[in-house]
Image (cartoon, rainbow, N blue to C red):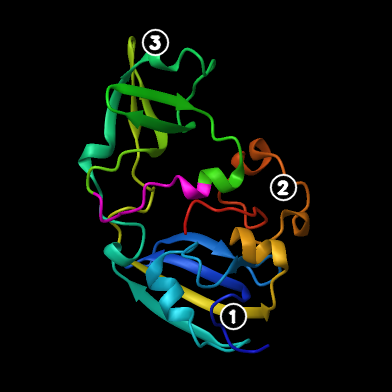
Amino acid sequence: MEIVQDKLKVSIAYTLMERSGKILEEVPASHPFVYIHGFNNIIPGLESALNGRRVGEKFTIDIDANLGYGLFRDDLILEVPKDELKEIGEIWLGMELEMYQDEDIREFQLPETADEFVDGLNLDSDDDNEADGIYTIKEIRKETVIVDGNHPFAGKDLTFDVQVIAVESPSFTELESGFPDKDEFDEQDEFDEFGDDLNNPDNFNRRWR
């Protein structure tokens, strides 16, 4: 298979940059990023740009924030009492937590799986009141913690230099889940391992969709 289209497994190499040219992330062809096309598992601007591309094709695409990681939302900056995090145990700057909110009840916990982490990212959505998702600890105060539910690249207009490395038929389980089978990735079954270095090109699930 040579052409990127829905329900196919696609491998890409890319360099992600701010419009200023500052490099935010690089994924080499030797360790490409793999995803299932058409399942909204990468940012919409990039998925749209990849549709119909051929294996070996290289291209550059500018993606505005609203078609990338979403606009920056001030309502996703929260000050949380430390008592709400006591079940978590040790906390540190940069730690990622998953928040659930139901009326007056709010709960933070560690994401249990890599898929859950990706699904929970607070990308821009049609529901402006939606606040559940992944939050990063930005500041630790005496009695409270400041957490941020915005994606690290939220509000940024971006440029991708992309190369299509491979297009393959996915397995049955990959079509069912919308994600590549984890056994393709060495020692990536545990969330703690993938969470140790989110910018490592070898990681299965990145902090972007």
Q: Nearer the viewer, residue 85 or 138?
A: 85
Marks 2 and 1 sit apart, C-alpha to C-alpha, by 23 Å
Residue, disc 3? 83
- Who's the residue at 56% across and 88% down the image? 57
In the displayed structure, 102 sits above or below 133; it is above
Q: Nearer the viewer, residue 53 or 171?
A: 171
Residue, disc 1? 164
Q: Nearer the viewer, mark 3 or mark 1?
A: 3
The amino acid type of the residue labelled 1 equals Val
What is the x, y in percent for residue 103?
27, 27
Residue, disc 2? 188
Q: Give the secondary structure at mark 2.
A: loop
Residue 182 appears in which quarter of the rendering?
bottom right
Indicate which disc residue 196 carries. none
The amino acid type of the residue labelled 2 equals Gln
Can the viewer see residue 147 in this picture?
yes
Count residues near mark 3 (Cα–Cα under 10 Å), then give few for <14, some for 14-19, many for 20+: few
- Who's the residue at 48% across and 75% down the image? 161
In the displayed structure, 145 sits above or below 189; it is above
